[in-house]
């Protein structure tokens, strides 16, 4: 399994739109791994996770084409993950396609939004539910419940393929007990997990700072969900978290956690 992190930034990216903070100023001057577009990922070149407003730029940067996608899987309905108006460009009059070239898997709220915006359009939307496994091609995909957007079934996603198990966990918050309990049946080869608030103690229960992120990872390691050699990579970083990429490396490396960056490729 190969996971490409197309974006690793939080809602306003890094540098943030209007940010005059230390992290944003540093990113504007130095670029590189400190430039973070809104979070998204691609598995094995064809399973797309989320559709942020930066998708077009990410595809051009990495020389990718969405015609290669076999599915688009959404985690939840926040604007930095669900740029709903971008879906129209797959169909007439922007292309000659008669049908959306891939199915869309989404929770009830996201699926309903798509159907409201595109009534009667030839788009296949399949509803997903936390703790209910579905299949796509030879992939087994299991959403788990995140503590994030509380008015909908916000989902993190477990992908199983050819003996490998991977969890994409952006926008998690501290998982509810039922999620921790459900995870005990899995042994993860890798996890990509949010670390939105960085060095700043967060006030929103739907996101993790470094200490909370480390606490979640320690809990998964202590219960055997993560092995000693399982890779742990962070994503969904906010400039307001006060951490440059090098700061994240410094604080996370002691816990055997790698800070993710835009364009990073993880091979399992």
Image: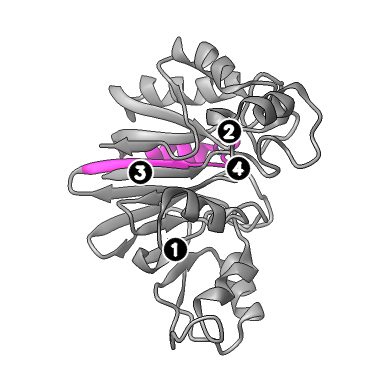
Q: Earlier in the sequence, mark 3 or mark 1?
A: 3
Q: Give me the residue at 53% from left, 86% from top.
A: 92
Task: Write down the residue under mark 3.
Answer: 3
Q: Earlier in the sequence, mark 4 or mark 2?
A: 4
Q: Earlier in the sequence, mark 2 or mark 3?
A: 3
Task: Write down the residue under mark 2.
Answer: 174
Determine whether, in the image, residue 78 is placed left or right of residue 231. right
The CA distance from mark 3 to mark 1 is: 14 Å
Q: Earlier in the sequence, mark 2 or mark 1?
A: 1
Q: Give me the residue at 33% from left, 36% from top.
A: 266
Residue 72's disc number: 1
SS for tag 1?
Answer: strand
| 5 over 75 or under it: above or below | above
SS for tag 2?
Answer: loop
Task: Write down the residue under mark 4.
Answer: 147
| 51 over 188 or under it: above or below | below
Residue 127 drawn at (x, y percent) = 48, 69
Residue 44 drawn at (x, y percent) = 30, 51
Q: Give me the residue at 55% from left, 45% from top.
A: 39
Tag nearer the camera, 1 or 4? 1
């Amino acid at each position: 399994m190969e996971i490409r992190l197309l974006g690793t930034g939080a809602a306003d990216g890094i540098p943030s739109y209007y940010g005059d903070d230390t992290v944003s100023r540093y990113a504007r001057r130095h670029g590189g791994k400190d430039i973070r577009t809104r979070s998204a990922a691609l598995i094995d070149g064809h399973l797309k996770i989320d559709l942020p407003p930066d998708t077009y730029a990410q595809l051009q940067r990495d020389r990718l084409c969405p015609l290669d996608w076999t599915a688009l899987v959404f985690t939840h309905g926040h604007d930095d993950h669900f740029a709903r108006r971008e879906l129209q460009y797959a169909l007439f009059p922007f292309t000659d396609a008669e049908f959306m070239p891939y199915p869309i898997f989404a929770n009830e709220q996201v699926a309903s939004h798509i159907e409201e915006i595109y009534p009667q359009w030839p788009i296949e939307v399949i509803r997903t539910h936390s703790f209910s496994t579905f299949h796509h091609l030879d992939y087994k995909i299991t959403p788990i419940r995140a503590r994030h957007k509380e008015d909908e079934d916000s989902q993190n996603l477990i992908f199983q393929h050819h003996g490998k198990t991977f969890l994409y966990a952006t926008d998690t918050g501290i998982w509810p007990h039922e999620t921790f309990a459900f995870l005990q049946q899995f042994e993860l080869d890798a996890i990509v997990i949010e670390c939105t608030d960085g060095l700043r103690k967060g006030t929103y229960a739907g996101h993790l700072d470094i200490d909370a992120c480390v606490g979640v990872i320690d809990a998964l390691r202590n219960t055997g969900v993560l092995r000693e050699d399982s890779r742990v990579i962070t994503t969904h970083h906010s400039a307001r978290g006060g951490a440059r990429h090098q700061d994240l490396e410094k604080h996370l490396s002691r816990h055997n956690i790698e800070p993710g960056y835009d364009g990073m490729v993880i091979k399992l």
